[in-house]
Image (cartoon, grey):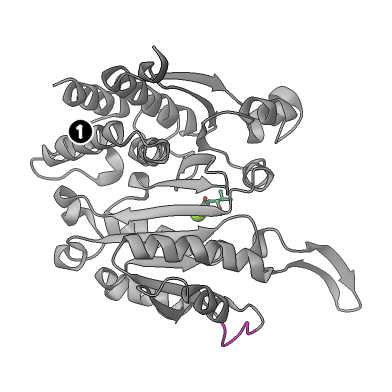
Amino acid sequence: MGSLSKPSYRIVAIPGEGIGPEVVEASLQILQHVAKIEGFTLRVDYGWLGATAFLQMGSYFPQATVQLCDGANGIVFGAVSQGGLLELRKHYDFFCNLRPIRIVDSLVHKSSLRPEKVQGLDILIIRELVSGIYFGPAGRSSDEKGAYGYHTMLYYDEEIRRIARIALQKAQERRGLLTVAHKENALPHLGWTRLVQEEAIKFPGVVVEPMLVDNLAMQMVLNPQRFDTVLAGNMFGDILSDIGGALVGSLGLLGSASLNADGFGLYEAIHGTAPDIAGKGIANPLGTLGACVLMLQQWGEVGAAQRIIAAQEQVLSEGYRTADLFPQGSEILINTEKLIDLLLEKLSS
Ligand code: IPM
Ligand code: MG
């Protein structure tokens, strides 16, 4: 059949702990369903990471998981409470973390802000993921003043330049505004502003707007609609992206893609293990599903991605809500399983 044969993908699912296994399983059901509709096949291998990996295999980041991930088309990740995740990101050099913050029309009333403040909201946060303070020299020691701990925010210029080029490219494809988070009034040696501006010469259509990260955090709450593409280092991006959860109504809605230079990626929700609701079957799988949509788009399976987005918008517009979205009035409280059933139903119709 040659070029007419069905594409076939292999992913590694790493459910992790807490609500991780629930949201991954839910998302895989949807993925398998659209695969059937769109005519591609999806093979899933299961990998271990974090505390569950440590219990099973004596390591937070087992070699067996790496072997499984090598050569896969993507990694779908649930959540871990400790260990393994940063190692996984670093191992594959997933430096480019894309965190879209997009409001769903029917959820404007769920935002922490008034609906008119978030109507049409569409921000892309691009977070550097394998350097900065998460990976700089760190440790505990002591001197004559006593014991101390330290983490160092260290960035090679080239690490800033490579993420800057991607952010500029994304901004060019979007609305042409790139806001760059920095803290140069206190941390002047990290050259985010200058380095991004130098790279921007190759992207004449893009306006680069450096902004002190504390002010940026405030502006995201005061006037989020003014933002288009936001570039941030590892820790600032972590913090800013949680504000995104408040803007769109629930952190449970947000997914992310972490890519390396080859386009290989790790796809995960922005939320964590949520131990308070784990095992109850009530977690919102839309964050992980959103990450899977990013994976499909990365593969060029845009039809499949579009189907999932449409089904999700339909279910939400009919008033169905998982607990994190605090159903009120005529809205209908549903659990994870019911949400998946509804999505499968919409996908088939
Ligand atoms: C995130 C998370 C992680 C991070 C934690 C779990 C290490 O908060 O992906 O936003 O800080 O990167
Ligand atoms: Mg975070």
- Quarter location, residue 233: bottom right
Q: Give above or below for 46 relative to 103.
A: above
Q: Which residues are magenta?
A: 184-188
Q: Give above or below for 228 relative to 322.
A: below
Q: Position of residue 183 (x, y in %)?
A: 55, 80
Query: Residue at the bottom extreme?
Result: 185
Q: Quadrant of the C terminus?
A: top left
Task: Compare residues 101 and 117 and report the one nearer the observer.
Answer: 101
Task: Compare residues 31 and 246 and report the one nearer the observer.
Answer: 31
Magenta: predominant secondary structure element?
loop
**Location of mark 1 (residue):** 311
Q: Give above or below for 107 relative to 318.
A: below
Task: Compare residues 244 and 163 and report the one nearer the observer.
Answer: 163
Q: How many marks?
A: 1
The answer to whether residue 42 is magenta is no
Q: Position of residue 147 (x, y in %)?
A: 84, 69
Left or right: residue 13 versus residue 55 is left
Left or right: residue 307 versus residue 142 is left
Query: Residue at the front extreme?
Result: 2
- Quarter location, residue 144: bottom right
Query: Residue at the right extreme?
Result: 144
Query: Residue at the left extreme?
Result: 330
Left or right: residue 84 versus residue 77 is right
Q: Quadrant of the N terminus?
A: top left
Q: Position of residue 210 (x, y in %)?
A: 45, 80
Q: Is residue 271 visible?
A: no
- Which residue lies at the image location 44% right of the left edge and 53% below the top edge? 98
Q: Residues within 10 Å of mark 1 (few under 14, many from 20)?
A: some
Circle 1: residue type: Ala
- Which residue lies at the image location 86% right of the left edge and 78% below the top edge? 145
